[in-house]
Image (cartoon, helix red, strand yellow):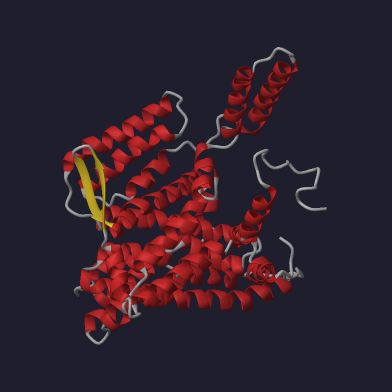
């Protein structure tokens, strides 16, 4: 039976033209399949990085540079603000990315893997080791040199890319190992946020504290009055972003602050939703049953039903779910396209400074990350401060350490803030090489080590998401 003939499905809108609707479904269905595969955002991120790299080294390299320097202005009456396209991507859109990070951090701190010190002990130890060892390794190679300020670059982990690598390994990866990586990466993000705020900000203008304090006070006041997060909260968010920019702290930190202030507990909850929804539906039915009912009377129970639906989940979860596809498939790929383009012809590794910066970042990601994560985690377990979760072996932990060496988005972001203009290209190249090598090691080690671990436990190794996606595109597997 065709999709339109299935009586179990809702019929199309009355104004829909069936041939056009079928055509639209054929066009969008491959995209929907692509969006449903968990590794898709990481694949798109990689594709944009490759496009940027090829573009920046092509005969059209000049157009790549000119595109991101294109001025773009926002004006309201006599006030206007003009910046380059690169600024709006790195300073405004990335604030939305860090808003999602802030929401994830808040949720994990309140009810997730970081809410209990015993559960958080192992990923906390792993994250600390994964940040300190790469920074020390980089600092050892670049101490006292022009590139010394880049110590924060190899400390970063790209959550989407790292989780995407584990996703490509499919059912070889125990669920507990994914939780460890996610918790580790979130703690890593907290570290990266603190580093940006404390060490990679410009001169401080204390007069901006009035704007920042006012925006925070307004946001907390709205929460205190029982006003639920919505469009009204955009205005104090914009003021907070502008205040951070004027203060001299990188304005993307505003996204983190807004995320941390967002309520993480639902108002109605699941049971409250069922009660409120049932009452609204009963009222709706009673009004419809009256022969003389007016359709305007139906708006009130429908509003209550909509409110119950919104408040079944927490605002943090709801906003995170809504923003995630925009961030994963829009903002982050755009950031990669705007920042991963390194003109290799203009990068010289022959002088000592460039070479040590490149080696410091690459070795920090490829060697320092897994070494720090494994070493400090092993010490933590040996001292009895933490324990390995069920189903996780030290071999699996090595895969996590290698995946954590995928710095990409956050590492490039910190590099843009840390280096002088003549070293930014070298820093980006180090991040790209370190990310590529770490990805290959994580995938290779995962295929070898985790496959053996699964066989030892008698569990069956199933298709990876990469194989599944290939079958989707070739038509060998139904959606």
Q: Quadrant of residue 222?
A: top left
- Whether residue 284 is visible, yes or no, is yes
User: How far across and how far down the image is residue 438, in percent?
Assistant: 47, 75
User: How far across and how far down the image is residue 34, in percent?
Assistant: 60, 62
Quadrant (top left, top right, bottom left, bottom right) of the C terminus: bottom right
Residue sitting at x 54%, y 72%? 398
Q: Is residue 401 left or right of residue 64?
A: right
In the rendered view, tell whether residue 217 sits above or below residue 338: above
In the rendered view, tell whether residue 404 sits above or below residue 436: above
In the rendered view, tell whether residue 392 sits above or below residue 216: below
Most extreme residue toward the bottom is: 350
Most extreme residue toward the right is: 1
Residue sitting at x 42%, y 35%? 231
Q: Is residue 206 left or right of residue 139?
A: left
Q: Is residue 443 left or right of residue 53?
A: right
Q: Is residue 90 left or right of residue 305?
A: left
Residue sitting at x 43%, y 64%? 157
Residue sitting at x 63%, y 62%? 30
Q: Quadrant of residue 219?
A: top left
């Amino acid at each position: 039976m065709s999709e339109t003939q299935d009586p179990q499905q809702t019929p199309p809108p009355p104004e829909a033209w069936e041939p056009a609707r079928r055509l639209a479904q054929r066009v969008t269905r491959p995209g929907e399949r692509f969006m449903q595969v968990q590794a898709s955002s990481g694949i798109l991120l990689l594709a944009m990085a490759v496009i940027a790299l090829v573009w920046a080294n092509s005969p059209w390299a000049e157009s790549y540079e000119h595109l991101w320097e294109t001025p773009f202005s926002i004006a309201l009456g006599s006030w206007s603000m003009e910046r380059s396209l690169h600024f709006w991507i790195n300073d405004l859109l990335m604030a939305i990315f860090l808003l999602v990070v802030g929401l994830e951090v808040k949720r994990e701190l309140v009810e997730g893997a970081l809410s209990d010190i015993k559960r958080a002990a192992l990923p906390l130890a792993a994250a600390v080791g994964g940040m300190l060892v790469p920074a020390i390794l980089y600092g050892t190679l670049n101490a006292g040199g022009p590139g010394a300020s880049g110590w924060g670059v190899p400390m970063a982990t790209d959550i989407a890319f790292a989780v995407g690598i584990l996703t490509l390994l499919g059912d070889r990866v125990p669920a507990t190992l994914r939780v460890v990586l996610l918790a580790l990466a979130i703690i890593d993000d907290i570290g990266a946020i603190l580093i940006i705020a404390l060490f990679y900000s410009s001169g401080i203008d204390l007069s901006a504290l009035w704007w920042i304090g006012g925006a925070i006070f307004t946001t907390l006041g709205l929460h205190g009055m029982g006003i639920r997060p919505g469009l009204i909260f955009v205005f104090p968010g914009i003021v907070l972003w502008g205040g951070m920019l004027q203060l001299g702290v990188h304005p993307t930190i505003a996204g983190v602050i807004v995320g941390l202030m967002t309520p993480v507990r639902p108002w109605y909850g699941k049971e409250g939703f069922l009660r409120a929804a049932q009452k609204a539906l009963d009222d709706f039915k009673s009004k419809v049953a009256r022969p003389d009912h007016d359709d305007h009377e139906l708006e009130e129970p429908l509003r209550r039903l909509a409110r119950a639906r919104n408040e079944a989940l927490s605002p943090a979860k709801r906003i995170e779910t809504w923003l995630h596809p925009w961030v994963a498939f829009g903002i982050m790929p755009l950031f990669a396209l705007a920042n991963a383009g390194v003109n290799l012809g203009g990068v010289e590794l022959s002088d000592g400074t460039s070479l040590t910066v490149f080696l410091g970042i690459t070795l920090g990601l490829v060697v320092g990350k897994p070494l720090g994560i494994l070493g400090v985690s092993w010490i933590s377990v040996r001292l009895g401060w933490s324990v390995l979760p069920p189903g996780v072996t030290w071999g699996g932990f090595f895969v996590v350490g290698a995946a954590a060496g995928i710095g990409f988005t956050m590492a490039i972001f910190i590099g843009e803030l840390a280096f002088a203009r003549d070293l930014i290209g070298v820093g980006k190249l180090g991040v790209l090489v370190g990310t590529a090598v770490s990805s290959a090691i994580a995938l290779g080690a995962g295929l070898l080590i985790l496959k053996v671990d699964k066989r030892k436990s008698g569990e069956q190794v199933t298709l990876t998401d990469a194989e599944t996606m290939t079958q989707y595109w070739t038509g060998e597997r139904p959606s």
